[in-house]
Image: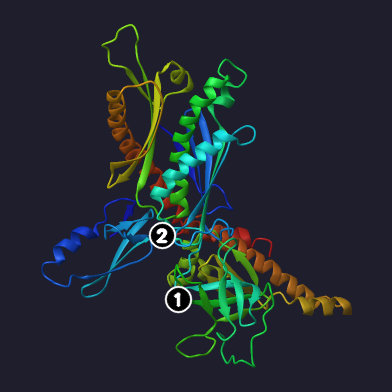
């Protein structure tokens, strides 16, 4: 799992981040707390508006499904009681996804569209974290997400399946199932599962192995990447300080 | 003591709390500032923003903790100094004021001006700007401003900022706080070596600046009609100086202190 991040790159939004991981490139932007439309206003907490835009074409049901998954996660990490009657707007714009890279090739059939959406979700979550921190939105804890695929060798039944962290599209095709797991991180340790999306065939035992692998991966993302990029961002925010 | 804290990290204050509690039954008093939040359920103090953790002792047994961080969205707090744009009148009693684009509007009562009475009200138009103090802010109520110094009842520097100055936005709110509150900041000091200016800094990310005699539009028009250009030249020079000062202030927020002289020279090179 590796990615590069650039924060505060959009001039007109309160917080933004560009994340590049594998074949996926996206920009996440956060505006808020701002004045909501009357129908969005909630009396005691902040309302969330999440917009996901695909790299190519218009957003459809797939993006709406992604938005809903992201919303359930963000509702759990944003301190929404701090901003009653206000709106927090999160926009994720994909710049390139595995589909745009392989478009027209052997990978653009209907089956793939279902499959890669989960690695998009993984990238969207990680991008969101940096944009939210950049915007200064109050969070209960940090969070990090990882995608793990598992491939079983059907010839040898007793062998351990192969676990691939952050698989690319080709590896996803060969895999039997893949999982996106997001942990909240308190005091540099993965604490609770915030989101778990699985697709494919797997056993309960395999799922538990995947989760325990995700714990170390999420801690690694937090300690190696999130801390590094945020320290960089804070240094940048205070360049004028003598 | 300063270290970088991320949301969810353990705060260095928990240790201190435990140590001090047995000696002092009431416990030492803790004041938490921006970036920290007391969780309703667990009654724990948690960091909610990423930034530099600061702790200060105000009095004996009284500690102040906060996280120093940058943001672009202004959240009103009581006693903040802000610049607002009048956007409307509510019920003939108060003005609707915008502190930042897309933020909730705030209220400026017509009675919150020096010497204002029911009969003698300020007459402000839409689009005019005021320098004001946040008198009342909280999540559950609408934010209110006032243009009086509460200790003297006089204007105290608050009130209408006239059109001879120039208003511009600064994205980093931490930078406007530095300009307003840090007396050792060299940014404005350096600017004063190049021009005479009057400045109002709102920590909501708006800065009003007037260089020289300001941009007196009326004067320019009159002079143009008479065909004499001396005063008009003066005024257009002031416009140039103002824009150069604006350029200097906005560029300084993205550069280190040793670059300031360079930027100042670059900004003023055509004048």
What residue do we see at 33% from left, 56% from top?
Answer: B47
Chain at numbered mark 1: B
Asked whether the residues under the numbered discs 1 and 2 touch, taking CB atoms below 8 Å apart as contact, a structural biologist would say no
- Reading the image, the residue beneath label 2 is A81
Question: What kind of element bears circle 1?
Answer: loop
The residue tagged 1 is B79
Q: Nearer the viewer, mark 1 or mark 2?
A: 2
Q: Position of residue B120 (x, y in %)?
A: 64, 92
Q: Residue at x 27, y 31 (%)?
A: A212
- The picture places residue B215, in percent across and down from the top left corner, at 71, 74
Q: Chain of mark 2?
A: A
Q: Find residue A234 and report its horizontal and vertical position in percent.
A: 41, 52
The answer to whether any part of residue B183 appears in the image is yes
Q: Quadrant of the C terminus of chain A?
A: bottom left
Crowding around mark 2 (Cα neighbors within 10 Å: few <14, some 14 to 19, many 20+) is some
Quarter of the view holding residue B123 = bottom right
Q: Point out residue A170 in the picture as x, y percentages from the top left corner.
A: 47, 18
Q: Secondary structure at mark 2?
A: helix
């Amino acid at each position: 799992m590796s990615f590069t991040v650039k924060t505060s790159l959009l001039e007109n939004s309160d917080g933004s981040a560009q994340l590049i991981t594998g074949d996926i490139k996206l920009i996440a932007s956060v505006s808020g707390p701002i004045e909501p439309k009357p129908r969005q206003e909630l009396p005691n907490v902040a309302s969330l508006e999440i917009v996901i835009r695909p790299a190519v074409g218009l957003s459809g049901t797939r993006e709406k499904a992604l938005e809903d998954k992201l919303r359930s996660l963000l509702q759990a990490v944003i301190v929404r009681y701090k901003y009653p009657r206000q709106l927090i707007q999160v926009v994720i714009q994909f710049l390139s996804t595995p589909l745009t890279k392989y478009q027209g090739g052997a990978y653009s059939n209907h089956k793939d569209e279902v499959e890669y959406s989960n690695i998009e979700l993984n990238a969207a979550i990680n991008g969101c974290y940096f944009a939210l921190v950049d915007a200064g939105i109050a969070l209960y804890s940090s969070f990090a997400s990882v995608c793990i695929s598992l491939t079983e060798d059907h010839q040898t039944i007793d062998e351990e399946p192969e676990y691939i962290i952050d698989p690319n599209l080709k590896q996803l095709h060969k895999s039997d199932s893949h999982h996106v797991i997001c942990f909240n991180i308190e005091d540099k340790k993965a604490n609770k599962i915030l989101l778990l999306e699985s697709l494919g065939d797997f056993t309960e035992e395999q799922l538990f192995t995947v989760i325990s692998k995700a714990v170390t991966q999420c801690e690694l993302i937090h300690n190696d990447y999130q801390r590094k990029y945020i320290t960089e961002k804070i240094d940048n925010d205070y360049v004028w300080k003598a | 003591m300063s270290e970088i804290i991320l949301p969810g990290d353990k705060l260095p204050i928990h240790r201190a709390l435990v140590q001090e509690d047995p000696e002092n039954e009431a416990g030492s008093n803790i004041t938490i500032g921006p970036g920290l939040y007391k969780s309703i359920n667990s009654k724990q103090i948690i960091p909610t923003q990423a930034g530099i953790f600061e702790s200060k002792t105000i009095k004996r047994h009284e500690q102040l903790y906060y996280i120093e961080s940058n943001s672009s969205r202004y959240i009103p707090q009581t006693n903040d100094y802000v610049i607002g744009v009048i956007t409307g009148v509510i019920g003939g009693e108060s003005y609707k004021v915008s502190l930042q684009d897309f933020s909730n509007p705030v209220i400026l009562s017509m009675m919150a001006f020096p010497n204002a009475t029911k009969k003698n009200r300020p007459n402000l138009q839409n689009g005019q700007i005021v320098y004001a103090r946040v008198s009342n802010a909280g999540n559950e109520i609408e934010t209110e401003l006032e243009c009086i110094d509460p200790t003297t009842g006089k204007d105290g520097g608050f009130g209408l900022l006239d059109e001879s100055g120039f208003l511009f936005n600064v994205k980093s709110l931490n930078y406007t706080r530095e300009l307003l509150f840090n007396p050792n900041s060299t940014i404005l000091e350096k600017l004063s070596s190049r021009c005479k200016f009057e400045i109002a800094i709102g920590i909501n990310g708006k800065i009003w600046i007037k260089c020289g005699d300001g941009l007196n539009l009326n004067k320019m028009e009159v002079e143009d009609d008479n065909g004499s250009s001396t005063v008009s030249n003066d005024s257009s020079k002031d416009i140039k100086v103002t824009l150069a000062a604006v350029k200097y202030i906005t560029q300084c927020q993205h550069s280190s202190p040793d670059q300031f002289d360079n930027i100042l020279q670059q900004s003023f090179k055509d004048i």
